Image (cartoon, rainbow, N blue to C red):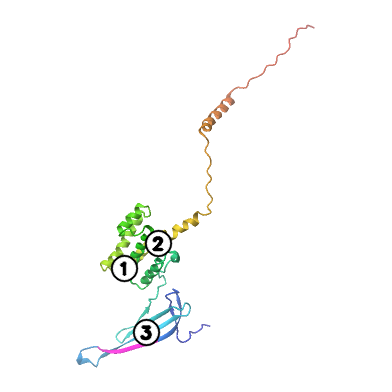
Amino acid sequence: MVKEKEPGVEVIRCHHCKTDTDHRLLHTEEKEGKYSLGSDYEMQQSGSWSIEWKSFMCVGCHELCIRKTVDDSEAEYPNEEYYPPRPGAEARTPPKWIHTLPDNIDLLVEEVFTALQNRSYRLVAMGLRALMDALMNATIGDCGGFEEKIREMIDEGLLSKVQKEVLEPTLELGHAAIHRGHAPTGNQVDAALAVVMSMLELFFVQKKAVTTIVKGIQPRVKVAKPSKSRQSAAPKTAKALKAKKKQPATQTSLATPANHGTI
């Protein structure tokens, strides 16, 4: 028997749980009005609209959300919006290793993912640019602009040519969003996010993991090479043994005593 939901409880995709959960209704506010559909002469023809706000709390994690429902007599269906926006089934979430990042960098990563879930793609591009700036400052110090920092990291062997080729467009996306009002697409910020997350993981997570990997590995045993005198003597010995095998065996003749007597 299916248990019915109690009054005031709805199933909503939770922003924190990233799945559909029961949400309890906390509060409701409504607003409505009318508007004219024609000229002053046709004022008798009018439309109506209504706005409803409802606040909910997830019964699992206690995360709060607000649903705004806008209805119009001329619209076919009401329009619903959630704050913060509801994540999709495959929503991007911060990596599990975020807590291992240095202070302030982990908070910035969380802000970037919040902007991504809210589809604020300009903020995502700006945040990714700021993350790379923080990574470089933590690695080599604040030695100038991005060009100087990239050059310094390459000179110190911290950045490869391939990494430079994928990093520069990511930074340019942030530059364009800040200085030229560029509106990045979802695909652009998703690709840039993958680049920056891989860099953060490499410098702050994988470098620490190397210590764990190396610890306890059985060292390779090196076999001592024979000295030059032994190496040169070995062939001679083998050659001598081979020659000895080919040498015919010597027979020992036994002398018989002479028969001096006669019968």
- x, y percentage for residue 251? 65, 19
Asked whether residue 40 is drawn in magenta, I would say no
Q: Under tag 1, what secondary structure?
A: loop
Give the residue at the far right of this rendering: 263
Q: Which residues are magenta?
A: 28-36
Give the label on residue 185, or none: 1
- x, y percentage for residue 140? 37, 57
Q: Which residue is mark 2?
A: 200
For the stretch drawn in magenta, what is the main secondary structure?
Answer: strand
- x, y percentage for residue 82? 37, 79
Cα distance, mark 2 to mark 3? 40 Å
Asked whether residue 32 is drawn in magenta, I would say yes
For marks 1 and 2 on the same chain, the one whose residue lies earlier in the sequence: 1
Give the label, 3 or 1, closer to the camera: 3
Amino acid under label 2? Answer: Leu
Q: Which residue is mark 3?
A: 53
Amino acid under label 1? Answer: Thr
- Give the quarter of the image for residue 76: bottom left
